[in-house]
Image (cartoon, helix red, strand yellow):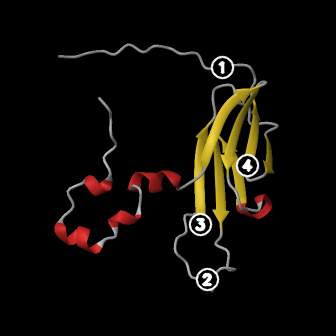
């Protein structure tokens, strides 16, 4: 048995809606929605918690703001649309412009001192030192009531 993802085209749209919207133009609304925002990778390496964010086409000095507060890293990026294509005849643009914010909860043991960030080839990389203390899993009993 195979599992198929139901496309928005397969949905039962009202007749007036399907005749007015060019629903065959997109591969799927969920695919479009998943591309908006900042995509990240998070991992731990050499006593450092590393966050890599994919933010091409920006100037890190002007367009990025990093802030760390109460165990949460806030990454704000602003990507402005270039004016050089104003006279071009556009068919499609899948680039995303505007302000984007990503909140990343840091793991237990992450330190807010000596955090370093670098930007190279469209990748912002943030290194957060770990103090060696890792979160231990604690099972919580669930009380049932009748």
Count residues near mark 3 (Cα–Cα under 10 Å), then give few for <14, some for 14-19, many for 20+. Answer: some
**Alpha carbon distance from label 3 to label 4:** 17 Å
Q: Is residue 20 left or right of residue 47?
A: left
Earlier along the polypeptide chain: callout 2 or callout 3?
Answer: 2
Between 62 and 13, the one lying in front of the other is: 13
Which tag, 4 or 2, sits closer to the chain's start? 2
Residue linked to disc 2: 88
Label 4 sits on residue = 123
Provide the secondary structure element on which disc 4 rests: strand
Q: Quadrant of residue 1?
A: top left
- Residue depicted at x 21% and y 61%: 13
How far, Cα to Cα, is label 4 from label 2?
29 Å
Q: The residue tagged with tag 1: helix, strand or loop?
A: loop
Q: Note whether residue 139 is visible.
A: yes
Residue labelled with disc 3: 97
Position of 91 relative to 143 (above/below): below
Lower sequence index among marks 3 and 4: 3
């Amino acid at each position: 048995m195979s599992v198929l993802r139901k496309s928005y085209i397969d949905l039962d749209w009202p007749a007036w809606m399907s005749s007015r919207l060019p629903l065959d133009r997109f591969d799927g609304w969920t695919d479009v929605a998943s591309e908006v925002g900042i995509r990240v990778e998070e991992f731990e390496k050499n006593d450092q918690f590393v966050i890599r964010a994919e933010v091409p086409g920006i100037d890190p000095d002007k367009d990025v703001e990093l802030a760390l507060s109460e165990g949460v890293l806030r990454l704000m990026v602003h990507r402005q649309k270039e004016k050089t294509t104003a006279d071009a005849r556009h068919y499609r643009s899948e680039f995303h412009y505007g302000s984007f914010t990503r909140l990343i909860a840091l793991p237990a043991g992450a330190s807010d001192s000596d955090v370093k960030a670098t930007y190279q080839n469209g990748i912002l990389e943030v290194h957060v030192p770990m103090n060696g203390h890792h979160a231990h899993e604690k099972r919580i009993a669930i009380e049932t009531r009748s």
